[in-house]
Image: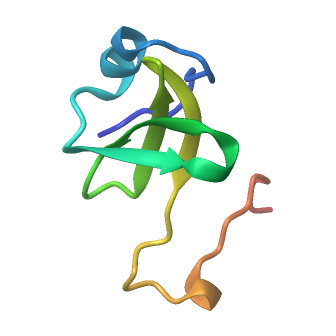
Amino acid sequence: MHHFSCLHLEDDEAALRRQLGEPTDISPFEFEEDGVSGVVWSYAPVPISIELVDGKAYSFRVWRPEYVEPNERKLSLLENR
């Protein structure tokens, strides 16, 4: 189980590993138009990834698994009443 709460942009690698454990995949990325490059940590089978620049969290992404159609997903931050 991965706990995604308490993560913040600019957290360092140690903080990310403490919260999520070791990534299942690490691969490079580059946004040439923005002059930004770093690595992407992925956590399969959980559909989350974190982009790191200079060893700090630059962005978090939550992906829709390929087998789930967009109209099947239901996300609510409100409790069911």
Residue 13 at x, y = what percent? Answer: 37, 16
Judge by depth and name the residue closer to the eye, 13 or 73.
13
Q: Compared with residue 20, is residue 50 higher up or lower down, i.e. above or below?
A: below
Question: For the point 30% across and 46% down, which residue is it?
Answer: 43
The answer to which image quadrant residue 2 occupies is: top left
Residue 66 visible in the snapshot: yes
Residue 26 at x, y = what percent? Answer: 25, 41
Judge by depth and name the residue closer to the eye, 40 or 54.
54
The answer to which image quadrant residue 59 occupies is: top right
Q: Compared with residue 25, is residue 38 higher up or lower down, i.e. above or below?
A: above
Question: For the point 43% across and 50% down, which residue is it?
Answer: 48
Residue 70 at x, y = what percent? Answer: 60, 85
Question: For the point 63% across and 24% down, which residue is it?
Answer: 9
Residue 42 visible in the snapshot: no
Q: Compared with residue 54, is residue 24 higher up or lower down, i.e. above or below?
A: below
Q: Compared with residue 66, is residue 9 higher up or lower down, i.e. above or below?
A: above
- Quarter the N terminus occupies: top left
- Quarter the C terminus occupies: bottom right
